[in-house]
Image: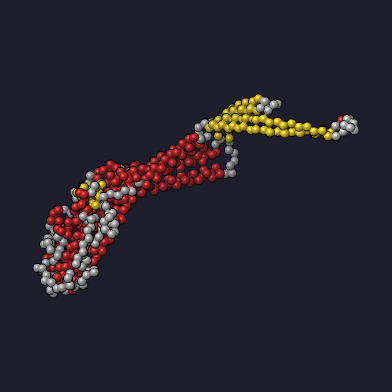
Amino acid sequence: MRKFRVLPLVLAVSLAGQAQAADLISIARDALVSNADLAASRSGYSSVEAGEDIERGDLLPQVSATGGVTRYNITSSQRSNLAGLGGGAGAGGITGGGSDNHYTGTTVQVQATQALFDATNWYQLEASKRQTAQEALNLRVDRQQLLYNVAQAYFDVLRAKEQLDTLRAEEQAVSRQLEQVRQQFDVGIVAATDVYEAQASYDLTRSQRISQESTLQVNFEALEQLTGKQYSSIDGLADDMPIERPTPTSQQAWVEMASSQNLNLLAARAAVEVARANLDTSRAGHLPTLSAFANYQYGDSDQDTLRGHNEQNQIGLEATIPIYTGGSTSAQVRQSTYSLEQTQYQQESQLRTAVQQVRSYYAQTLNNVLTVQAQKRSIESNRSALEATRNGYEVGTRNIVDVLQAQQNLFTAISNYADARYDYVLNLLSLRQEAGILDVDTLQVLNGWLRPDKAVLLNFESQGTTGLGIGDDQPDPGMNGPSPLEGSQGQRRLPPPNRTALPDDDDLNGLGNSGMPDGLRNGMPGNTGY
C-alpha cells in the first residue's frame, strides 16, 4: 500500500493565502533594526566617537581642588639638674615638667592648568576625528553588506524552493515511467534492463530531492539568523521580472563610480588619513610644550601660638623641552611612517580590487541577461527533443535510456533557467555594492519584482517529525516494496496502450516559481493523464 505524507512546504503556493507573507523590504528593515552584527558595529562606532571627546578634553582647562583637616596631638616634657645651678646639697636632684598641645589644621588648594601649546595632544585629537570618520565608513560598509546578505539569503530560499519543485516534478515523472516500464516488462514488451534503468533514474532523482529539502532548510535558517525573527512565508519572484542590462550601460561609468564611491575604498582612504595624523603625533614628540597654571592655597590652624590662617596665590607658565628620550620618539616616528606606507598600499590594493570586481560583475550581469534568454529557449528545444525521443521509443528506434536522458535534460533546462534568473539578481546586487550604491532603495526596486501569489511557505514548526514540514510524500517503488521486476502488487499486469510515461502538466504544477513560460508548459508532451 502506498503511503503519502503531506508536504506543507511544497504546497506553499496553495497555502500562501492562509499566511501573512513577508517581502524583501520588510525583512531588510527587520535586519537593520535587530541584526546583532550591525548593532555591534554601531556600538563600535559610538565607542570610537567617544574617544574623540577624550582627546579633546586634554586640550581644555584642567581644574582640581584638594582639601584636608588634620588633628594634631603633641605631648612634650622637660628635665633639669638643679645641683648644677648652686642649689646646695639639699637642693640637688632632677626636676621635670611638660605640656600637651591639641589643635586642628585645615588646608584647601585649588589648581588650574591650561595647555597653551601641545602639538602632541592636538594631533591626537585630529587623529581621533579621522578615526571617527573611518569608523563611520566602516559602519556604512557593514550596513551595506547586511542589505546584500539579506537579499542573498532571501533569494537563496526562493532558489532552493524552485529547485525542490523541479526535482519533485521530475521524481513524479520518473515514478510514472517506472510503473509504465514495469507493466511493459510484465507482458514481455521490454527487457529487465529497461526496468533497472528506470529504477536507477528514480532512485537518483529521489535522493536529489531529499538533499534539496535539506538545502532549503539551511537557506531558510540563514535568513532567520540575520533578523532573529521567524516568518510564515515570503513573496516569490515574478515570472515576468525584468532582465535588462544594468544602467548605466557603460562599463567605464561603473568603474568610475567604484573608484569614487566604493565604501571599502573610502574606508581605506580614511585609514590613510588616520595613519598620517598618527605620524604627525609621533613627530610632535620632538616639540616643546607650554602651559599656564594658577594655584590657590588656604591654611587655617587653632594652635594657641599660631592661631590664624594663611593664603597663598601662584600664577605662572611652565615649559617642557624634550632633550633626550632614549630614542623612543624617533622610533615612534619610524613606526608611524611604516604604518602610513602600509595603509597607502592597502588603499591601492582596495582600488584595484574594486575596479576588478565591478568589471567582473558588470560582465557577469551582461552574461546573465544572455544566459536567461538562452535557457528560456533551451526549455523549448529540450521539450521538442523529449517529444521526438518519445516517438522514437514508441516505434522502437530509441530505448528507455534515451527517454530518461531526454526527460532529465528538460528538467535540467528548467532548473538552469531558474538559476540564471537568480544569478542575474545577485550579480546585479553585487555590481551595485562594488559601485557603492547598494541601499534600501535598491531593495525596494527588487521588492517590486516579487509577487504575493508566488509566496513560499516557511513556517516549519509543528509540521512533521522533522520539524520542517518536509516529508517523503512520494512512493518509493524500489524501497520497502516489491522487486523492480515486479508490479506494485507483485503481480504481472496488462500494460496500457503502447505509450511511455512522460512528464505531464500534473508533474509541472509545482514549477510556478521557475518562470517557465506558459507556452512551454502547455506544449509539454505526454499530457495523457495516467
Direction from residue 210 to residue 488 in the image, left or right: left
> As displayed, is residue 160 above or below residue 118?
below
| Foreground residue among 468 and 120 | 468
Residue at the outermost front position: 90
Colour setup of the view:
secondary structure
Direction from residue 375 to residue 50 in the image, left or right: right
| Foreground residue among 189 and 278 | 189
Q: Quadrant of residue 202?
A: bottom left
**Identity of the residue drawn at 39% across and 41% down:** 136
> As displayed, is residue 311 above or below residue 343?
above
Q: Position of residue 144 (x, y in %)?
A: 33, 45
Q: How many marks?
A: 0
Residue 521 visible in the snapshot: yes
**Identity of the residue drawn at 12% across and 56% down:** 522
Q: Quadrant of residue 327?
A: top right
Q: Position of residue 377 (x, y in %)?
A: 17, 55
Residue at the outermost right position: 89
Quarter of the image that includes the N terminus: bottom left
Residue at the outermost top position: 308
Q: Position of residue 258 (x, y in %)?
A: 33, 44
Direction from residue 188 to residue 122 in the image, left or right: right
**Identity of the residue drawn at 87% across and 31% down:** 91
Q: Position of residue 530 (x, y in %)?
A: 12, 63
**Identity of the residue drawn at 43% across and 39% down:** 49
> As displayed, is residue 490 above or below residue 267?
below
